[in-house]
Image (tube, grey):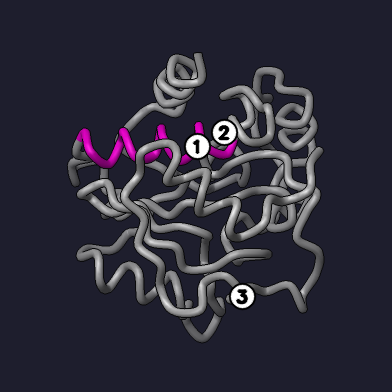
Amino acid sequence: MASPMSAGGFLDALRAEGLTVVQVGEWRTHNRNHKGPWGPVNGVMVHHTVTRGTDTTVRICYDGYEALPGPLCHGVIAKDGSVHLVGYGRANHAGLGDDDVLRAVIAEKGLPPVNEANTDGNPHFYGFECENLGDGEDPWPEAQLEAIEKAAAAICRHHGWTARSVIGHKEWQPGKVDPRGFSMDDMRARITARLK
């Protein structure tokens, strides 16, 4: 368990990992903190957006939509590997998931099968939405995969976590398929190598 880093610390950590960061609007204070706590934080969650086009994707993730107000994550990872910061604090990205998974993330142990949605993940996870249609055919450019690796590693490095603190949405919430098109086990291996 850890207290969330400051917005400035988050920005600095991403830049220190070598990422190109784009700051969007009032991202530092754009959050859903009035709906509940932000923290303690325990991990990083990776999503795909089911959208095409960086500008459209960033706008949706900043503003949200009628049924789910933004921000929908902390950062949007574009196809070109740039990270667009759209919010900081509690964000509408994780939703309800499996408490057994949260316990495994906290303990940095292997993940159990996800089979229930009984715990609010929004206080506990930094969230990155990754621009991809999520159909299993839309490509994941190497620049984007490297940015996912770097962004997750930056947060893990700050908090002293291992790659076991990084999960996909599908590993948290039953019925979710994101991120689709690459293996989270492979991504965790990349993050582990980077943290060394």
The answer to whether 153 is drawn above or below residue 68 in the figure is above
Which residue is rendered at x = 19% and y = 39% of the image? 141
Q: Residues within 10 Å of mark 1 (few under 14, many from 20)?
A: many
CA gap, disc 1 and disc 2: 7 Å
Say which residue appears at 51% left-offset and 49% top-offset. 12
For label 2, the crowd category at 10 Å Cα-Cα, with few meaning under 14, some 14 to 19 and many 20 or more, is many
Query: Of tags 1 and 2, which is closer to the observer?
Result: 1
* Residue kind at label 2, given as amino acid type: Val
Q: Which tag is nearer the camera, tag 1 or tag 3?
A: 3
Compare residues 107 and 182 and report the one nearer the observer. Answer: 107
Q: Is residue 170 above or below residue 48?
A: above
Q: Tell me the distance, in whole angstroms, between the alpha carbons under discs 3 and 2.
A: 24 Å
Q: Tell me the residue that label 3 is attached to.
A: 29
Residue 189 locus on image (x, y percent): 45, 17
Q: Quick one: label 1 or label 2, which is nearer the N terminus? A: 1
Which residue is tagged 1?
A: 152
- The quadrant of the picture occupied by the N terminus is top right
Kindly report which numbered mark, 3 or 2, lies closer to the viewer in this rendering.
3
Mark identifier at residue 166: 2
- Circles 1, 2 touching at the beta carbon (< 8 Å): yes
Q: Give the magenta-colored segment's residue range.
A: 142-155
Residue 143 painted magenta: yes
